[in-house]
Image (cartoon, rainbow, N blue to C red):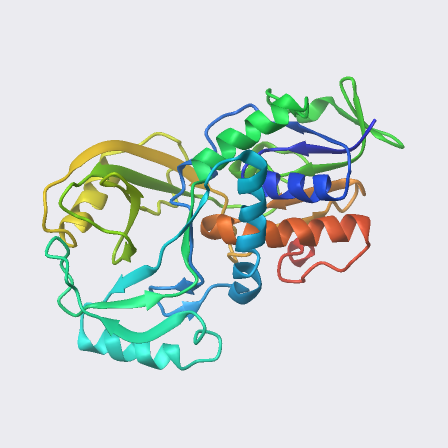
């Protein structure tokens, strides 16, 4: 008998595992190890929507959780995950510079936007109008996090590396799944939720994102660049470039069309040679109102969902995991903006 069965081990699943361990709750995780969208994400945490110069949802509360959450994981797993890197947004005109200054005076954005315009001194980057700097931003190595956390759970016999077969779940006073019994079950399956008979009617639409990994010895960036795409330095002259947004294609395969789109955009930003090393694709678990899906099933009172983190999973995961844990264990109210009751 365990306190929890958890289905799925992306960023949401890891964040919930951390809450369970912190409160000494027993649990078992089911995850087949298929490539999750978390593993192919850029991993950026950025409190500002740079297309519109607006604050990301709940940005202040989420950003303050980055250091304690990922710092604790670094200590636990013995690896470096958190890379503090400013995001430099390329300006394309004087008008964009003026819009940046206007945005930086707003109370919600003032902590995150530098009021200085940074001139471009890198001959390999096309930015004649300079950059605006986003503060309190950086990158989490999500692929390494997922790999190391799987190993951590396997050593503790807390991970079953197989797909969860929903039809085998039996419900009575307790939950039964094969030889396992539990008080609660939490589904954190990402886009796999579309095959979950208990929550499949929630409006998880998903969108496909593709990224390139390039080698560019002359680029010499130590900050994240944002224009029509992000350019993310990984070290040793290697960069990730992305991402695309495709709302129709729900296959996990990389496409020629996305590669051409990314290269066309990249060539307008960089003025140096590069080689494409790799192309990755994943389906982001996005929701029609761009807010997470958190809450309790309307019929089965010990069935819960933790999903819909979308493009900001690195920032959102610690917050929503805490919200759900406190909702279950402390009978705290869920943030109405993430509660699945908004769709019922």
Residue at image point 52% right, 25% down: 33
Q: Position of residue 73 (x, y in %)?
A: 56, 41
Q: Is residue 8 left or right of residue 80?
A: right
Q: How many marks?
A: 0
Residue placed farthest to the right in the image? 173
Residue at image point 18% right, 72% down: 93
Q: Is residue 330 left or right of residue 115?
A: right
Residue at image point 52% right, 58% down: 289
Indicate the quadrant containing the N terminus: top left, top right, bottom left or bottom right: top right
Q: Position of residue 142 (x, y in %)?
A: 45, 40
Establish if 53 lies above or below 267: below
Q: Is residue 141 visible?
A: yes
Q: Is residue 292 visible?
A: no
Residue at image point 52% right, 35% down: 78
Q: Quadrant of residue 273?
A: top left
Establish if 274 lies above or below 265: above
Q: Position of residue 213 (x, y in %)?
A: 27, 37
């Amino acid at each position: 008998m365990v306190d929890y069965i958890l289905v799925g081990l992306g960023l949401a699943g890891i964040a919930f595992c951390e809450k369970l361990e912190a409160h000494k709750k027993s649990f078992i995780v089911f995850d087949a190890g298929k490539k999750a969208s978390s593993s192919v994400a850029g991993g950026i945490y950025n409190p500002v929507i740079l297309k519109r110069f607006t604050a990301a949802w709940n940005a202040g509360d989420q950003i303050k959780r980055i250091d304690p959450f990922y710092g604790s994981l670094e200590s636990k797993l013995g690896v470096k995950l958190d890379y503090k890197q400013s995001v430099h947004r390329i300006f394309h005109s004087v008008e964009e510079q003026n819009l940046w200054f206007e945005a930086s005076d707003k109370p919600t954005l003032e902590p995150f936007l530098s009021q200085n315009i940074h001139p471009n001194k890198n001959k390999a980057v096309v930015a004649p109008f300079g950059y605006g700097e986003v503060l309190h931003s950086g990158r989490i190595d999500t692929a390494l996090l997922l790999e190391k956390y799987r190993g951590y759970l396997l050593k503790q016999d807390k991970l079953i590396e197989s797909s969860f077969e929903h039809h085998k779940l039996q419900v009575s006073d307790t939950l039964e799944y094969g030889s396992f019994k539990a008080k609660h079950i939490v589904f954190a399956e990402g886009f796999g939720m579309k095959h979950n008979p208990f929550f499949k009617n929630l409006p998880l639409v998903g969108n496909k994102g593709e990224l390139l990994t390039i080698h560019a010895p002359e680029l010499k960036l130590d900050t994240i660049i944002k224009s029509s795409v992000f350019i993310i330095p990984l070290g040793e002259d290697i960069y990730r470039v992305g991402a695309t947004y495709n709302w129709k294609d729900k296959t996990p395969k990389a496409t020629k069309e996305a590669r051409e789109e990314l290269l066309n955009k990249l060539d307008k930003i960089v003025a140096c040679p590069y080689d494409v090393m790799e192309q990755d694709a994943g389906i982001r678990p996005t929701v029609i109102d761009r807010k997470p899906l958190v809450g309790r099933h309307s019929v089965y009172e010990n069935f819960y969902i933790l999903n819909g983190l979308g493009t900001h999973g690195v920032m959102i995961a610690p917050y929503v995991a805490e919200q759900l844990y406190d909702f279950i264990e402390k009978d705290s109210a869920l943030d109405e903006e993430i509660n699945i009751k908004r769709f019922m």
